[in-house]
Amino acid sequence: MLAGKAIHELHELLIKKEIRPQEIVEDIFKRIKQAEEKVKAYITLTEEMALKQAQEAENRLIKGENISFLTGIPLAIKDNICTNGIKTTCASKILADFIPPYDATVIKQLKAAGVVIIGKTNMDEFAMGSSTENSAIQITHNPWDLERVPGGSSGGSAAAVAADECIAALGSDTGGSIRQPASFCGVVGLKPTYGCVSRFGLVAFASSLDQIGPLTKDVTDAAILLTAIAGHDPNDSTSAPMKKEDYTQNLHKEVKKLRVGIVREAMIEGLASEVKTTVEHGIKVLSDLGAEVIEVSLPHLDYAVAVYYIIAPAEASSNLARYDGVKYGFRDKTAKNLFEMYCQTRSQGFGAEVKRRIMLGTYALSAGYYDAYYKKASQVRTLIKQDFLHAFEQCDFIITPVAPTPAFKIGEKVDDPLQMYLSDIFTIPINLAGLPAISLPAGLSKDGLPIGLQIIGPHFSEARLLQVAYQFEQALDFKEKPKLEED
Ligand code: GLN
């Protein structure tokens, strides 16, 4: 089945002319027809456009011009990344009919590389959530166990990759939304350094934390996708002034004299024993490869979730002010005056979680409270970042779990937002510090659910981070796949 292959495998077949891009697209849509009813990973499918793009990719391959690793490769895109002429809903009623008149920079880059876009994936509304249950459109099911969540907020992208409903996908990560669903669905997820990938055209949730990144079947594919989307973008004022880099080039080179840090404070209450043993086994794999294991301390780790739930909602409350029923998206038509129009549009257009965040954020930013909440949180954020910088003086990379548990059941945490928030304890600090981190499949629980391991690197260490991840992947040789057919 072509749909089950990785980008680099398909690329080999495409350049040898053993297959045509159209065949991959056809195989993907065949797979979608079998699996989508159960998984519900997509909000929008773009079959007609995909076939057209496959034809264009074939023309390039025949001419031998402009060929990249991604030419003719079908990808899925999270529905908060703007795609010209294709609905971009953020899984919200307020943007249910929004069709962007432009492409996000990452989409432009992917199109230039010759990709085929299969569709837009489901997510928690405006990327607020950890289970995809906050989508106003549908709940996505975990392909490993359909009664469980795929994680979130990029749950549709992770589930689509795991179920072979696309070859790879893009997600976005504000507090873990690429890495946690990657962990729950047994795929690779990379959150790049803040500023490494352009945010132009990514619908903003919390602008100082958001990053776009790849969800893929293996580390090589993550390096391929990052190579295509990373680099400076003058349209994004927070984009780093960095040169284009080929992250695939040194992937296979051994990393020598590696020092990996394990975090003293990571053994939190609520950490499932299976997650603990899987991560310990992962650390052993790295030490067998010759890495020195060092204990490091992140003394302010405990404050990360609290800090995040001030900063992210504060930024969200400001970013989401634009959905007022005037500029774009849904508008309540029954209102009798302007105030009612704003009020009714936003009351009906936003879901409960989004409203909760807007209220939290507006409160934290209001006069008289700003210094006590937002300013204090920003100060503690700096301390958390300094903890990491200090730890990286002693080690090259830090290993932690991705999430405290494997995928939980649909409905298990929806009524308990605090429990849901606490499950991001290992991913949130990375966004606060602006660091790159990758989630790698590291084993299965006794119930057959995937468990991820997180490798965190210093700022802009993506090339080496991917090298270490590749070595880990080769040594562990995790080959399990979800058995969707038997469900
Ligand atoms: N789960 C976290 C939240 O609800 C992170 C989401 C994300 O990374 N977009 O905010």
Image (cartoon, rainbow, N blue to C red):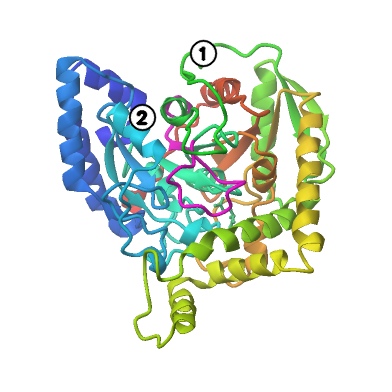
**Residue type for callout 1:** Asn
Residue nearest the viewer, comparing 373 with 27: 373
Q: Is residue 205 left or right of residue 404?
A: left
The residues tagged by marks 2 and 1 sit, at their Cα atoms, a distance apart of 19 Å
Q: Position of residue 123 (x, y in %)?
A: 44, 56
Q: Earlier in the sequence, mark 2 or mark 1?
A: 2
Q: Position of residue 459 (x, y in %)?
A: 65, 29
Q: Residue at x 68, y 59 (%)?
A: 309
Q: Which stretch did the figure color magenta?
A: 198-221
Q: Is residue 322 left or right of residue 21?
A: right
The residue positioned farthest toward the bottom in the image shown: 336
Of the numbered discs in the image, which one, if any, rests on residue 6? 2
- Quadrant of the picture in which ligand 1 is shown: bottom right
Q: Which quarter of the image is occupied by the N terminus?
A: top left
Residue 202 lies in magenta, yes or no?
yes
Residue 309 lies in magenta, yes or no?
no
Q: Which residue is mark 1?
A: 250
